[in-house]
Amino acid sequence: MRSKAIGKRKKRPWTVAFKLAAVARMDGSVSVEALAEELGVGARLLYDWHQRYRSGGAAALRRMGRPLAGGGTFEQAPRAVDDERRRIAELERKIGEQQLDLDFFRAALRQVEARRRTNGGPGGTRSTR
């Protein structure tokens, strides 16, 4: 039977605001280890955040991984969100127009079918041609 690997932890996505608050508290804290235990993070991680903040400011504390839409810079994220919201609104408008068209054609089809039933049903008059 295998034992679980010691030291492996699930990665948690800390927000930039949380990291900034932790770095600010770290400057005034007597014990970084006590602060790390209170916040539920490792002391090494706190030191890493502190170093990144000193070298690059708040932008350096953003999550690692895939770049943000629109070039990947922190400042461009709101513009990309606005572009996506505009695109969503445009697509929703188009869906609404298509729904109106479908409703119109369904009603027209019902009318055509109703006329066919009354004119060509059993017992109706036949064409003389």
Image (cartoon, rainbow, N blue to C red):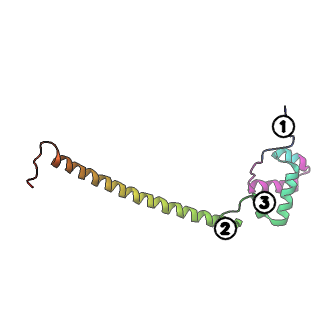
Question: First in sequence: mark 1 or mark 3?
Answer: 1
The disc at residue 61 is: 3
Q: Which kind of residue does numbered mark 2 sit on?
A: Gln
When asked about the image quadrant of residue 51, the answer is bottom right
Q: Which kind of residue does numbered mark 3 sit on?
A: Leu
For the N terminus, the image quarter is top right
Out of 36 and 109, give the one closest to the viewer: 109
Label 2: how many residues lie within 10 Å, few (<14), some (14-19) or many (20+)? few
Give how far apart the Cα atoms at labels 1 and 2 are. 42 Å
Left or right of 42 in this view: 59: left
Label 3: how many residues lie within 10 Å, few (<14), some (14-19) or many (20+)? many
Image point (90%, 47%), residue name: 33
Image point (79%, 63%), residue name: 60
Give how far apart the Cα atoms at labels 1 and 3 are. 31 Å
The disc at residue 4 is: 1
The disc at residue 76 is: 2
Give how far apart the Cα atoms at labels 3 and 2 are. 16 Å
Question: First in sequence: mark 1 or mark 2?
Answer: 1
- Classified by dominant secondary structure, the portion drawn in magenta counts as helix
Label 1: how many residues lie within 10 Å, few (<14), some (14-19) or many (20+)? few
Image point (74%, 51%), residue name: 13
